[in-house]
Image (tube, rainbow, N blue to C red):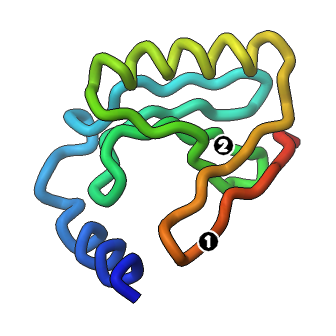
Amino acid sequence: MSDLFNLLSAMSSMGSQPVSERTVARDSVDGFGISTVLSPDMGYETALGLTNGNWNPVERYGTRADATVGHARWLARVRGGERQFTMLGYGDLCDEETFTLS
């Protein structure tokens, strides 16, 4: 239950920092999004966007510098044709799950 409380608390504070300041990098490859941001609940993370509009977090980082490097690595993987990944879990709310960009 504490994970749900943390998520809801973080979501309520999202407006305190402009999106432009939270965004590390954002790219698109073959219609798939690669977005790295400072999320209010989990820190810096990269998520991959599917064509159905869902976003799946794939890596989290401790610093903005690590997030910048990580974003470039995910961009290269998607540009290289990789399409199967593992979505990160979120505490006791959801487990890691394999997904395919489609």
- Disc 2 marks a residue whose amino acid type is Gly
Residue drawn where x is 18% and y is 66% of the image: 13
Side of 44 relative to 77 (left or right):
left
Look at the numbered disc 1 and give the secondary structure of its residue: loop
Counting residues from the start of the chain, the first of labels 1 and 2 encountered is 2
Side of 36 relative to 49 (left or right):
left
Above or below 3: residue 100: above
Residue 75 badge: none
Q: Residues under labels 1 and 2: Cα distance?
A: 18 Å
* Image-quadrant location for residue 15: bottom left
Residue drawn where x is 66% and y is 66% of the image: 95
Q: Which residue is identified by label 2?
A: 49
Above or below 74: residue 72: above
Residue 23 % position (x, y): 33, 33
Number of other residues with Cα within 10 Å of mark 1, as a class: few under 14, some 14 to 19, many 20 or more: few
Look at the numbered disc 2 and give the secondary structure of its residue: strand
Residue 85 % position (x, y): 77, 38
Residue drawn where x is 86% and y is 43% of the image: 100
Q: Are the residues tagged 1 and 2 within 8 Å (C-beta)? A: no
Above or below 78: residue 53: below
- Disc 1 marks a residue whose amino acid type is Cys
Side of 70 relative to 52 (left or right):
left
* Image-quadrant location for residue 47: top right
Residue 78 % position (x, y): 74, 21
Q: Nearer the viewer, residue 79 or 98?
A: 98
- Which image quadrant: the C terminus? top right
Foreground: disc 1 or disc 2: 1
Residue 94 badge: 1
